[in-house]
Structures are given as structure tokens and as C-alpha cells.
Amino acid sequence: MISNNIVRIKGLIDRAAQKRNRNPGDIRFVCVTKGRSPDQIREAARCGVADVGENRVQEAKGKYQLLKDINIRWHMVGHLQTNKVKDAVRMFDLIHSVDSLKLAKEIDAQAAKINKLQDVLIEVNASGEETKFGAPPPKALDLVKDMIGLQHIKLLGLMTMAPFVKDKEATRPSFRKLRQLQVEINNFLSTVNYEPSTVLSMGMSHDYEVAVEEGATMVRIGTAIFEEQNR
């Protein structure tokens, strides 16, 4: 099942990319493994998954230790509390959910202790929903300006979660807003000789095709990999 689901997902990503004359090879999918067992993750890895995303540091710790023998990149895709940063920096290749300067400074401090340059994304609340984490779009550029001086953080791009709605087309404005924000941020970064933001982490199991059409370079997929699909 996992193998068939991954083949289907890759095909749908390719089709969505081609609709916008994009190279499907530019899009990476992160296999979100919240609630999944190490054996399920191993099976996904055997089927070609190279990127694994976890929502909680505590859950990730056990899996990380058990899966050290396989070559996968670890992504922190859930909300990150400052008291979990030490462990997060030691495990994760990319942290998707930086939403405040306080959190960014703690990541920087913990990365400095192990001489690591930590790759991060800024989480943006592009939908404006009160229940979601993330910096409001008008504040994102200010956060960028505050973060780029931190020596042990490397800002790669932006992340967002669209509203969970039946009509996946209703997610398009959130993805489009994030892409437009990236252009604004890159205009600023070009003035301070900082490498441009290239990553747009957006799109999940129910809306990743729309996200790819709107410019996603990473999609975060869990349910569509590990559960039976009707389509």
C-alpha cells in the first residue's frame, strides 16, 4: 500500500508541476510520520522516501535513535517550544516552524553550542486563522530582518498551513500569498547580500497538488502515504 501510494503521489506532483511548466524534480515531498511506527518509516524509506517530518520532538527522539542506520533527512514540521530546541537542533536537518525572534535566538544559541549551522524556515500564518501558529504576513519581513544577523541559523524559506477545507481550491489564496511574500522577502535579501529564499514548504495530503501549482518546493504528506486512498 505504501509503495502504491508513493507512486500515485509522485505522479500527481509531476502532473501538477507540468501544468505550470515546472520541473517536477524541483519538488521534494516530506513524509510526515506523526503516529507512525519505525517499521512503517523503514518501509517508506525502502520505497524511496528520503525526507521524514515529525510534529513533536519527544516522539521524534525515539524514532531518531532507532532509525540511525538509514539515510533520511529529518524535518521538524510542528510547533516548536523553546524548551525543546536543544533536542530539536541535535536531530533535525531542517526546522520548518520558526515563528518568533525568541525561538530563532534559542535555536541559534543551541546550534552554536554544537557548532552547527541550522537550516530553518519561517512559519507564516497565511490564512489568518486564529487557531494556527505562524507569523502574520505583515510581520514576516520584520522577522527576517531580525534573524539574518544570527550566526548559527540559515534561512532557507517559508512554510505555511492552508485552511483544512473540503474544496481544495479554497487553499489556493494562502499558497499564493506565501509565494508573493517570498518575492518581497527576496527583494530585501538582495539588498543585504543574503542568499535568496528558495524553499516554499506548503501543501499537505489534501491540498498538495494545488500547492505545487502555486510554487511549493516542499510538500508535507502523511495520511496519503500511510492510509488507503479512494482515488
Image (tube, rainbow, N blue to C red):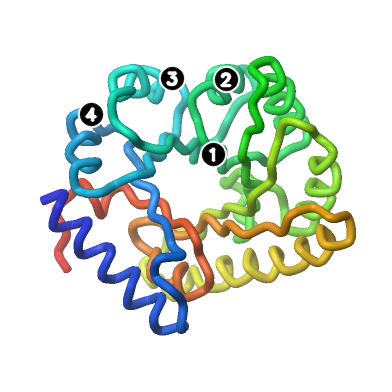
- At 32% across and 37% down in the image, what residue appears? 33
Whether the residues at callouts 4 and 2 have beta carbons within 8 Å, the answer is no
Q: Position of residue 221 (x, y in %)?
A: 35, 52
Q: Secondary structure at mark 2?
A: helix
Q: Position of residue 117 (x, y in %)?
A: 66, 32
CA–CA distance between discs 3 and 4?
14 Å
Q: Earlier in the sequence, mark 1 or mark 4?
A: 4
Amino acid type, mark 3: Gln
**Which residue matches tag 2?**
84
Whether the residues at callouts 2 and 1 have beta carbons within 8 Å, the answer is no
CA–CA distance between discs 1 and 4?
21 Å
**Which residue matches tag 3?**
58
* Mark in the foreground, 1 or 4: 1
Q: Earlier in the sequence, mark 4 or mark 2?
A: 4
**Which residue matches tag 1?**
94
CA–CA distance between discs 2 and 3?
8 Å
171 vs 41, nearest the viewer:
41
Residue 17: image tag: none
**Which residue matches tag 4?**
37
